[in-house]
Amino acid sequence: MKLYRTDSGPYVEHGGNYYRVPESSWDALVTHGNLHGYLLSVAGKGEIARDFSAANLLAPIGSQEVWAAGVTYYRSRDARMAEAKDAGGGDFYDRVYSAERPELFFKATASRVAGPRDHVRIRRDAKWSVPEPELTLLINHRGRIIGYTIGNDMSSRDIEGENPLYLPQAKVYDGSCALGPCILISEEPLPATTPIRLEIMRQGRVEFAGQTSLAELKRTPLSLAEYLFRDNSFPRGAFLMTGTGIVPPDDFSLAAGDRVRITIDPIGMLENDVVQGSPLHVG
């Protein structure tokens, strides 16, 4: 099942049909005691909605925080070591890749999150910016993974590379995160064979494309969620981005006007245009 947030309320897609969910509060949905069962009930008893439109999609987030895990793919480890080498921090990334404790950091509040077709931003004071396509977990207030979405962890590689202590500035700013297009509600984990694809379009052509799979993810989603909830509470649940295994070459940087497309089957595709130095407009 897929759960969508729109400007007219939530909808659930089941069996190829859409049903309006009789709950206006996204936070209440996320904290539902049995969200999977509740949505099955809605789809089983509700009338098929004819007014659902993908044009009305919002980022599937209420008041949840977005957190992120770093250096969870070998490709990301290599990239982080290379960019931080001159700052003396390259060894940190190798050590955290092999450590029991993962790197976890705060990524975004809901107001900083872009939805489908919203703009993501590159910092005005950055010269080397990239998108990071990531499977993103929706974790309820009890620490249980209840769904999956697509995340774009926009990053300023030159700022982080200058000094690892600058990571919050490289990662956390208006429009630095996108989520969508929906939440895949599932009681089963996604298979390791699940592919993650990235395309960056520039002036109508593919400027960069890459692909990885969850098989390359070193840490399990369950272990990442467990560490996030250690001595930390999220009364309305939380999102956790699980890291990226796709890193464009070092001579590539995003530019205003680029379009970022991230596809994770069976969730769908998240598409956002890139702007620089403009205010973020989200729902």
Image (cartoon, rainbow, N blue to C red):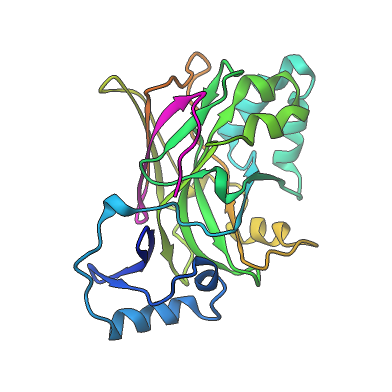
247 relative to 58 in the view: left or right: right
Q: Give the range drawn in magenta.
A: 264-283
Work out which residue is located at the far left of the displayed protein and give it: 50
Residue at the spot 31% in from the left edge and 79% down from the top edge = 43
Among the 4 quarters of the image, the one containing residue 125: top right
Looking at the image, residue 233 lies above or below residue 282: below
Total marks in image? 0
On whether residue 44 falls in the magenta region, the answer is no
Query: Which one is nearer the viewer's eye here, 274 or 51?
Result: 51
Q: How far across and down, in percent of the image, does residue 180 sit?
A: 42, 51
Looking at the image, residue 265 lies above or below residue 37: above
On whether residue 269 falls in the magenta region, the answer is yes
Quadrant showing the N terminus: bottom left
Residue at the spot 35% in from the left edge and 41% down from the top edge = 117
Q: How far across and down, in percent of the image, does residue 211 sit?
A: 40, 37
Residue at the spot 44% in from the left edge and 19% down from the top edge = 255
227 relative to 27 in the view: left or right: right
Residue at the spot 44% in from the left edge and 71% down from the top edge = 24
Q: How far across and down, in percent of the image, does residue 175 sit?
A: 52, 36
